[in-house]
Amino acid sequence: MTDTSIRDRILDAAEIRARRGGYGGFSFREIADDVGVKSSSVHYHFPTKADLGECLVKRYTERAADYLGVAAKLTPDQAIQRVTQMFRDALIKDDKMCLCGLFGAESDALPPEIRAATADFFRLVIVYLTQAFGPDWPGEPPAAILAKLEGALILARTLGDPSLFEVSVRR
Amino acid sequence: MTDTSIRDRILDAAEIRARRGGYGGFSFREIADDVGVKSSSVHYHFPTKADLGECLVKRYTERAADYLGVAAKLTPDQAIQRVTQMFRDALIKDDKMCLCGLFGAESDALPPEIRAATADFFRLVIVYLTQAFGPDWPGEPPAAILAKLEGALILARTLGDPSLFEVSVRR
DNA sequence: GTCTATAATTTGATAGAC
DNA sequence: GTCTATCAAATTATAGAC
């Protein structure tokens, strides 16, 4: 009942490594070892590394969309809190970067499909906040809020101080 | 008079590549080709890749310190403008990431010396703003400003829209 | 200081048996 | 679908001649 397909377990293992070391931070052999199969089996499910990376980002974005839900139901403050909590979970629960924050930082060196999928994640969050804010929102622009969250994750993790996230995000 | 030492040219070439692809985004051979020497000559100046990466970050941080100057001479607004312009130059003039924003994002997978040097860059900027603000600063905390700048760089570059930087950074 | 040469390992990827 | 076996290329790094 709780068994996960090999394909999903490959994505799980790849995501853990990618969210620590980026696109160069995982290899077919490492993932295969994590899952307990051979690297050729990983290639069966994802022919190239770009395929794997693209699926990784798209699944990550779908999960974010599910987590955030429908923005129209929320007040601006509720929407901000929801997005903030998503990044707080990455910091505290997962102890990992936002996959797209990391891929976005190295986007110049990524295969174009992965770069495009990463951009879609950012658009999703920005559209979500924009819809919740409505046309007359007087506060911080959606992009500014997202930027602060991605940057706060980087600072808090590099300096090893989760309170830096809260200080940066407080309003 | 304008000739640069091989050592400096190696650092220049490495920085260009590292600010696009991160720590995994440059190799001894690529840098050697960029400079016009052999990879063993790069190893002569920087025995290991960790040495090279550490020197890269320390030089980057020293240049930032020189650019920013002494915070005590500045009003809070002047200090913010100065830091903001430094990141705007990375986006527009250099068309590259902040080296430490990128290394910070992948800091989990970096050699400890490089991770520590990256943390020092963040501390430098935070201390700079803190000194300019004084004890009674009522506005955004220094870490929040730095986080927003790093994140805005990532967003603007991944979405290919420099105006996103200005929108995020406007106050 | 820079070179040639090379070692040892890892990488993404493929062919073909089962 | 997963395996064994293998490939070609790239990686960090070192030894030793000049």
Image (cartoon, coloured by chain):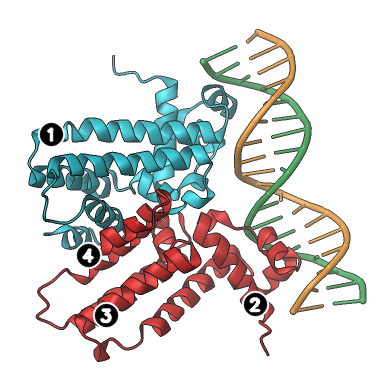
Chain colours: A red, B cyan, C green, D orange
Q: Point out the tag, 2 or 4, that comes first from the N-terminus.
A: 2
User: Label 1 to label 2, Cα distance in Å?
Assistant: 57 Å
Q: Position of residue A139 (x, y in %)?
A: 13, 71
Residue A7: give its label: 2
Q: Secondary structure at mark 1?
A: helix
Q: Residue at x 32, y 75 (%)?
A: A83
> Image quarter for residue A44?
bottom right
Amino acid type assigned to the residue bearing label 4 in the image: Ala
User: Label 4 to label 3, Cα distance in Å?
Assistant: 14 Å
Amino acid type assigned to the residue bearing label 1 in the image: Ala
Q: Secondary structure at mark 2?
A: helix
Amino acid type assigned to the residue bearing label 2 in the image: Arg
User: Label 1 to label 3, Cα distance in Å?
Assistant: 39 Å
The reply to the same-chain question for discs 1 and 2 is: no
| Label 4 vs label 1, nearer the camera | 1
* Above or below for B43 versus D1: above
User: Label 4 to label 1, Cα distance in Å?
Assistant: 28 Å
Q: Position of residue A77 (x, y in %)?
A: 21, 79
Residue A79: give its label: 3
Query: Mark 3, residues whose alpha carbon is within 10 Å: few (<14), some, or many (≥20)?
Result: many
The reply to the same-chain question for discs 4 and 1 is: no
Q: Residue at x 20, y 66 (%)?
A: A171
| Label 3 vs label 2, nearer the camera | 3
The reply to the same-chain question for discs 2 and 4 is: yes
Give the residue at mark 1. B72
User: Label 3 to label 2, Cα distance in Å?
Assistant: 33 Å
The reply to the same-chain question for discs 3 and 2 is: yes
Write down the chain letter for disc 2.
Answer: A
| Label 1 vs label 3, nearer the camera | 1
Q: Is residue B97 left or right of residue B111?
A: left
Give the residue at mark 4. A144
